[in-house]
């Protein structure tokens, strides 16, 4: 059991995103009370006023949000906030992270000169709810932004052997292997979700036979997602699971051969890919037993 988990340690390590932003929303007791008075309610909820708008913060939040998606795509969930980054994706992951960090801090530099104007707009927008003490100052504004990361090796009970009794080591190993099983399960779930979305999209696609007009289309996203999964899956298979390896090969050979226009225009191709996707889903069901 221990050696099986050590194999995972050889194949990847833990990473997490560390980030912070200025306070964008703040609870306003007066606003909450005013809502109750207007609606005749009693403690109906908390009113959180918007301090810095999405439009103002966009140059900063956009690259951070985009990289969070990259992080989810390229890591295997472990224990929050950690994900397992496969060694095979290390270079690509770090490249995306550097680019996102550069864009993030460039965004901070972009919005910094506009802070005073944004606060003035908030004063008009918030009216009686405006409190200048809610907002960052020009002096501390940049220090409120952070976009970095943390990483560490995947732990093993062996690391703690000198500090634990035999019973405690068994308990730690059981806990670690529970996490391991959940991590492997999450990859299978990702395959099922992505393949299922493609199968559903292709099955629902309809054209009016008389006019040729599309009455129920599908988005290119479903095709892009399956192609991206095909690229990542060999690396995400951090345990070398042969069943997952077989699925990866089938997805690449059967589901990624055609572009979106071909799937839309050619009924035979679309039906063949749809049938392959549904067959892969059946195989996944069989794995669950």
Image (cartoon, rainbow, N blue to C red):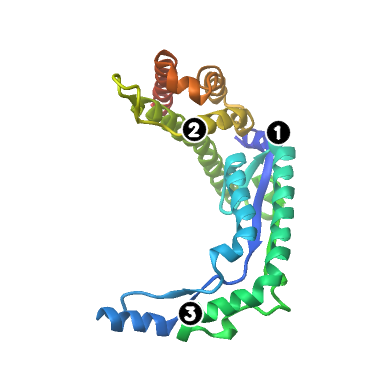
What residue do we see at 59% from left, 85% from top?
133
What residue do we see at 74% from left, 43% from top?
95
Query: Which one is earlier in the sequence, the residue at label 2 or at label 1?
Result: 1
Q: Does residue 148 lie above or below 14 as drawn?
A: below
Given the current orientation, which residue lies at the most extreme top position? Answer: 268
Tell me how far mark 3 sits from mark 2, CA to CA.
41 Å
Which residue is identified by label 3?
A: 126
What residue do we see at 29% from left, 81% from top?
38
Q: Position of residue 202 (x, y in %)?
A: 40, 26
Tag 3's secondary structure?
helix
Q: Position of residue 208 (x, y in %)?
A: 30, 23
Which residue is identified by label 2?
A: 220
Q: Position of residue 269 (x, y in %)?
A: 44, 15
Q: Does residue 40 lie above or below 62 as drawn?
A: below
Which residue is identified by label 1?
A: 88
Query: Which one is earlier in the sequence, the residue at label 1 or at label 3?
Result: 1
Q: Looking at the figure, which quarter contains the N terminus? A: top right
């Amino acid at each position: 059991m221990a050696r099986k988990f050590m194999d995972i340690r050889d194949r990847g390590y833990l990473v997490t995103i560390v980030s912070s932003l200025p306070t964008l929303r703040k609870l306003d007791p007066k606003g909450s009370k005013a809502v109750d008075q207007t609606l005749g309610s009693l403690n109906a909820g908390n009113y959180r006023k918007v301090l810095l708008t999405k439009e103002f913060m966009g140059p900063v939040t956009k690259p951070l949000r985009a990289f969070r998606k990259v992080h989810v795509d390229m890591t295997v969930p472990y224990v929050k906030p950690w994900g397992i980054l496969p060694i095979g994706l290390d270079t690509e992951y770090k490249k995306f992270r550097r680019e996102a960090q550069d864009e993030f801090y460039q965004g901070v530099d972009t919005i910094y000169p506009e802070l005073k104007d944004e606060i003035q707009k908030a004063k008009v927008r918030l009216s009686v709810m405006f409190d200048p003490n809610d907002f960052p100052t020009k002096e501390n504004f940049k220090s409120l932004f952070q976009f970095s990361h943390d990483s560490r090796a995947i732990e093993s009970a062996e690391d703690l052997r000198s500090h634990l009794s035999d019973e405690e080591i068994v308990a730690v190993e059981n806990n670690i292997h529970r996490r391991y099983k959940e991590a492997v399960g999450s990859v299978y779930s990702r395959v099922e979700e992505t393949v299922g979305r493609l199968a559903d999209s292709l099955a629902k696609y309809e054209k009016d036979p008389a006019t040729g007009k599309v009455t129920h289309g599908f988005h290119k996203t479903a095709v892009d997602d399956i192609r991206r999964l095909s690229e990542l899956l060999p690396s995400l298979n951090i345990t070398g699971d042969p069943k997952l390896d077989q699925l990866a090969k089938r997805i690449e050979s059967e589901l990624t051969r055609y572009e979106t226009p071909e799937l839309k225009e050619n009924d035979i191709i679309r039906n063949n890919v749809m049938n392959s996707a549904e067959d892969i889903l059946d195989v996944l069901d069989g794995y669950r037993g």
